[in-house]
Image (cartoon, rainbow, N blue to C red):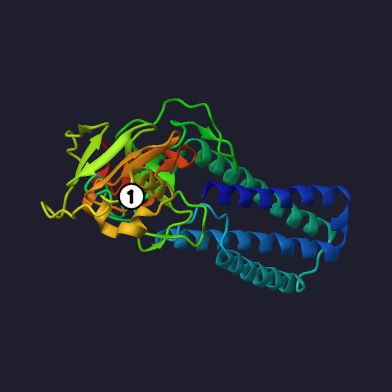
Amino acid sequence: MEEKLFWIGILMGSHLLLSHYFKGKKKFSSEKFTRMWHSIFFAIIFFAGAVMLAVSLGNRQGEVVTAVLFSKRQIIYGVIAAVFAGLWVFWRSRKKKFDAKSADKLIKSDMEWSETVFSAVILASIVMYLFIQAFKIPSGSMRVTFLEGDHLFVNKFIYGIRIPYTKKKIFKFRRVRRKDIIVFQFPSSDPQEFQCGGNQYGKDFIKRVMGLPGDKVQIKEGVVFINDKRITDEDYVQYLDGFNRYPASSDKIPQFEYQKYWQKRALGKMFSEYVRDNFGPVKVPEGHYLVMGDNRDRSCDSRYWGPVPEYLVKGRAWFIYWPFSRMSAPK
């Protein structure tokens, strides 16, 4: 969302910059040019509004794809709104007679609105990119720590600030720790790849970190072992299927091939639900994390689609702010 807001802000800033340029060139002394530029201002406003409305509706429906700036559908909605708004304002303005004073007042008002929107949107995008992000829980994979529909804030600066359009992070305040709850972009570079019954490309996930770089991770009958030691203090975990565990189905695969398939996100496709309760052992690659949902029997996580690269980690779950009855910080 922050990148979308940033480019909307740049669009408004471009209008403001060009308005100053045209004003210096005395272009607004022309009644026709003034009408056209005023219409363009409304076209830009309606384009931005329609695009952000489409983005917001997509977010509510679970169609959040953070790897794509704007979808084709969102752009089409924006262009349609811009064309209708621009033509309507231009047609309406033809009924009014412009003199130098009224034209100056009109353009000045447009420029003030452009400056206000530009400043507010750019500031909001910077805050969201560097410090804090709102996130809505899309599924039940983290029950009962989070419930579907919970709204929470994500602390984005704690693990470092990612340089835009790169994989490099700077100013890391602390490293990711075991059992941290993190929000990350799904680790796939293929928009056509299907995992967990759907296309997850570019979507934001929330899971708990279980395996750190270099860790040996294995699951036996639903029990997690890290570096051959059983993890016992998991009071946040929920098992809906009780003692009904899937048997192991990968005993005949050599370890190096199992590791390779896991890192290529192929285990879920090969073994389906059988990796849920008997998984590994695998070694978490350097610069990656193994993540799992707290609702272990209903979570599509690293067991199925592999490790999460550090550069895709967006931040740590901070606290629930909505609904008010559930306002709290996760453990």
Kind of residue indicated by mark 1 = Asp
Percent position of residue 23, x then y: 83, 50
Residue appearing at x 37%, y 44% in the figure: 259
User: Where is 174 relative to 318, above or below?
Assistant: above
User: Where is 36 relative to 126, above or below?
Assistant: below
Residue appearing at x 32%, y 48% in the figure: 303
Percent position of residue 236, x then y: 20, 40
Percent position of residue 49, x then y: 57, 60
Number of marks drawn: 1
Is residue 237 visible in the rendered image? The answer is no
Residue 265 or residue 132, whichever sits in front? 265
Residue 51 or residue 72, whichever sits in front? 72
Residue 289 or residue 270, whichever sits in front? 270
Q: Secondary structure at mark 1?
A: loop
Percent position of residue 260, x then y: 41, 46
Residue 201 or residue 281, whichever sits in front? 281
Q: Quadrant of residue 152?
A: top left
284 vs 146, left or right, is: right
Q: Quadrant of the C terminus?
A: top left
Q: Quadrant of residue 87?
A: bottom right
Q: Quadrant of residue 241?
A: bottom left
Is residue 324 visible in the rendered image? The answer is yes
214 vs 10, left or right, is: left
User: Where is 192 relative to 137, above or below?
Assistant: below
Identify the residue position indicated by label 1 in the image: 301
How crowded pointer 1 is (Cα within 10 Å; few <14, some 14-19, many 20+) is rated as many
322 vs 244, left or right, is: right
